[in-house]
Amino acid sequence: RAVHWYTKAAEQGQAEAQYRLGFCYTNGMGVAQDWGRAVHWYTKAAEQGQAEAQYRLGFCYTNGMGVAQDWGRAVHWYTK
């Protein structure tokens, strides 16, 4: 049920909801695990300055989870 409300808020640009929705996709909480969708929502939140999303996005780029491994992008997000 939480995913429903996170999705509504995330689609309206709420950074915290975007991060939490990405977290749900990362961990398969209320949705099927989907690293690509997680990266999508982490990126939206990270671009708005949401610190946890920036860290998680750095992790995704470091480990090639949902995106091609890219050390430069990882460093970019880890140092925001």
Image (cartoon, helix red, strand yellow):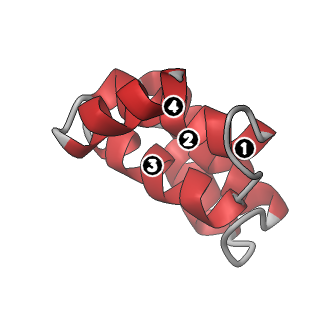
Residue lying at the far left of the rendered structure: 12
- Distance Cα–Cα, label 2 vs label 4: 10 Å
Depth check, mark 4 against mark 3: the one in front is 4
Residue at screen point 78% across, 37% down: 27
**Rendered-image quadrant of the C terminus:** top left
Residue at screen point 78% across, 67% down: 64
Q: Which mark is residue 38?
A: none
Q: Position of residue 58 (x, y in %)?
A: 63, 47
Q: Earlier in the sequence, mark 2 or mark 3?
A: 2
Dots 2, 4 in contact, CB < 8 A: no
**Circle 4 residues within 10 Å: few <14, some 14–19, many ≥20:** some
Q: Earlier in the sequence, mark 4 or mark 1?
A: 4
Q: Earlier in the sequence, mark 3 or mark 1?
A: 1
Q: Position of residue 14 (x, y in %)?
A: 24, 29
Q: Is residue 30 left or right of residue 5?
A: right
Q: Amino acid at mark 1?
A: Thr
Disc 1 designates what residue? 26
Depth check: 44 or 25 in front?
Answer: 25
Q: Earlier in the sequence, mark 4 or mark 3?
A: 4
Label 4 secondary element: helix
Disc 4 designates what residue? 3
Residue lying at the far front of the rendered structure: 1
- Distance Cα–Cα, label 3 vs label 1: 10 Å
Q: Position of residue 5 (x, y in %)?
A: 37, 25
- Distance Cα–Cα, label 4 vs label 1: 13 Å
Label 2 secondary element: helix
Disc 3 designates what residue? 41
Disc 2 designates what residue? 22
**Circle 3 residues within 10 Å: few <14, some 14–19, many ≥20:** many
Q: Amino acid at mark 2?
A: Gly
